Amino acid sequence: MPVFDSEDEDNAKPMSYDEKRQLSLDINKLPGDKLGKVVHIIQSREPSLRDSNPDEIEIDFETLKPSTLRELESYVATCLRKKPRKPYNTKNKQALALAAAAKTKEEQEKKKQELE
């Protein structure tokens, strides 16, 4: 397990309460297969937590170093950004756009007739 030196620590910007809260919420959104890496990041950067049970870890964000928190933030952001997207379907989009335009035009005609 790599050990990180204090140079990382010196360059890490401390997290605000809101950032820690958001990080906690984001970690809770992660699928189970991504949580092992969260535990690994914490254990590799926090000597006091190296012997903790990886199956049952409670994270106290107030005791973690800023560098650990920033590393977690970066990892979690990467995981949450890579959600599979539906393939872009131009035919459906065009059909929906045409239907919406036709409906709008129909409504405009109806209003125009009502006013006359």
Image (cartoon, helix red, strand yellow):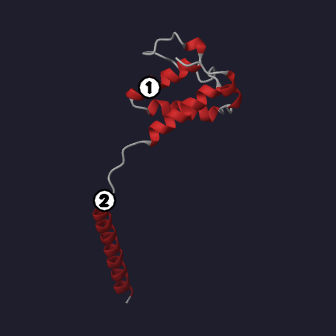
The residue lying toward the viewer, choosing from 20 and 109, is 20
The residue lying toward the viewer, choosing from 18 and 8, is 8
Name the residue carrying label 1. Answer: 35
Dot 1, crowdedness within 10 Å: few (<14), some or many (≥20)? some
Label 1, label 2: how far apart the Cα atoms are: 33 Å
Residue 72: give its label: none
Q: Residue at x 45, y 15 (%)?
A: 56
Q: Is residue 3 left or right of residue 31?
A: right
For this orientation, the residue located farthest to the right is 10
Q: Residue at x 46, y 25 (%)?
A: 37
Quadrant placement of the C terminus: bottom left
Dot 2, crowdedness within 10 Å: few (<14), some or many (≥20)? few
**Which comes before the other along the chain, label 1 or label 2?**
1
Residue 94 lies, in percent from the top left, at: 31, 67
- The answer to which image quadrant residue 60 occupies is top right
Query: For the residue marked with disc 2, what is the amino acid?
Result: Asn
Name the residue carrying label 2. Answer: 89
The residue lying toward the viewer, choosing from 19 and 51, is 51
Vertical comparison of 54 with 38: above or below: above
Residue 2 lies, in percent from the top left, at: 55, 19
Q: Secondary structure at mark 1?
A: helix
Residue 59 lies, in percent from the top left, at: 54, 21
Vertical comparison of 13 with 99: above or below: above
Query: For the residue marked with disc 1, what is the amino acid?
Result: Leu
